[in-house]
Image (cartoon, grey):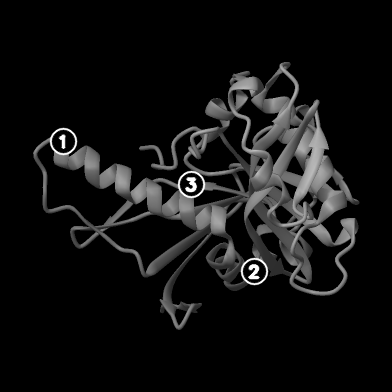
């Protein structure tokens, strides 16, 4: 049984075209905020919206959407735009919550693209790991994109299989070792992992939209009394091989924090 996040990675891999000439905003909007949250790339001027900064393990996750404001009449792929924007945003670092954040202090950039009608291209952002102050290329990071630093380095997050407990559904989060990582599942910090995902706006968005899709799918089949838990987090960590043990912990969300259940 698959997790209701859906295959965002397959959606993301599509080489969609945006015709930039159809998305130009007015020049008055460009002057409105002085231009500090804008950057130039691929022949256009892009505005940064929906900015979020989240600190995890003394490093920063940056999340935003980009929207075109000025452009030539060229066309680019969504993929090229996302990766070029990642490089530009590492330099720009708009609306930082503290005085100084260096490129090396950022571990991930999550981006979505907004068209001329203020509609987002994806239901949730594309996550790009940042290593040593550089955005990883599309080929380099592949599926291991939702990552964390510090004590969670070497792991990436995916949706786990649904669980049904007393007629109520849960949607676990599964941490898997990155290819080539030297990690030990017996030392995995599930408490830290739970609180990291709780602070992560992209993971929370994926979980919420996944629950909504699951409920809607059941309604369409005539099942209207489906119950899902929104205040419980299940964290699963897998070992490097099938022979390794795995960890599974259940948490109750209390005052914005994960409290382990016995």
Which quarter shows the C terminus? bottom left
Mark 3 touching mark 2, by CB under 8 A?
no
Q: Reading the chain from its start, which is encountered first: label 3 or label 1? A: 3
Q: Position of residue 48 (x, y in %)?
A: 68, 49
Most distant residue in the bottom direction: 255
Q: Is residue 254 above or below residue 127?
A: below
Q: Of the residues tagged 3 and 2, which is closer to the observer?
A: 3
Mark 2 touching mark 1, by CB under 8 A?
no
- Mark 3 vs mark 2, CA separation in Å: 18 Å
Q: Position of residue 16 (x, y in %)?
A: 59, 19
- Mark 3 vs mark 1, CA separation in Å: 23 Å
Left or right of 133? Residue 60 is left
Q: Is residue 141 visible?
A: no
Residue that label 2 marks? 189
Residue that label 3 marks? 159
Q: Quadrant of residue 75?
A: top right
Q: Secondary structure at mark 2?
A: loop
The residue carrying pointer 3 sits among few (fewer than 14), some (14 to 19) or many (20 or more) residues within 10 Å by Cα, namely many
Left or right of 240? Residue 199 is left
Q: Position of residue 242 (x, y in %)?
A: 59, 42
The residue carrying pointer 1 sits among few (fewer than 14), some (14 to 19) or many (20 or more) residues within 10 Å by Cα, namely few
Q: Quadrant of residue 98?
A: bottom right
Residue that label 1 marks? 220
Which quarter shows the N terminus? top left
Q: Secondary structure at mark 1?
A: helix
């Amino acid at each position: 049984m698959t997790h209701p996040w859906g295959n965002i990675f397959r959606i993301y891999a599509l080489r969609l075209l945006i015709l930039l000439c159809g998305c130009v905003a007015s020049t008055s909007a460009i002057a409105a905020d002085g231009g500090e949250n804008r950057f130039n790339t691929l022949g256009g001027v892009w505005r940064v919206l929906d900015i979020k900064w989240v600190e995890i393990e003394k490093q920063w996750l940056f999340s935003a959407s980009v929207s075109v404001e000025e452009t030539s009449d060229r066309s680019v792929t969504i993929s090229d735009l996302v990766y070029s924007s990642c490089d530009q945003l590492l330099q720009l670092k708009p609306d930082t919550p503290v005085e100084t954040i260096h490129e090396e202090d950022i571990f991930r950039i999550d981006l979505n693209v907004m068209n001329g009608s203020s509609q987002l291209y994806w239901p949730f952002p594309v996550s790009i790991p940042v290593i040593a102050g550089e955005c990883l290329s599309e080929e380099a990071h592949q599926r291991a994109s939702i990552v964390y630093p510090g004590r969670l380095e070497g792991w990436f997050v995916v949706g786990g299989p649904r669980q049904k407990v007393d007629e109520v559904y849960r949607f676990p989060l599964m941490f898997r070792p990155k290819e080539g990582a030297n990690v030990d599942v017996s030392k995995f910090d599930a408490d830290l992992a739970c609180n990291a995902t709780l602070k992560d706006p992209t993971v929370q968005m994926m979980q919420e939209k996944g629950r909504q899709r699951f409920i809607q799918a059941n309604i369409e089949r005539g099942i209207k009394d489906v119950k899902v838990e929104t205040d419980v987090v299940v964290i699963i960590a897998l070992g490097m091989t099938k022979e390794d043990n795995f960890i599974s912990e259940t948490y109750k969300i209390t005052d914005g924090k994960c409290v382990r259940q016995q």
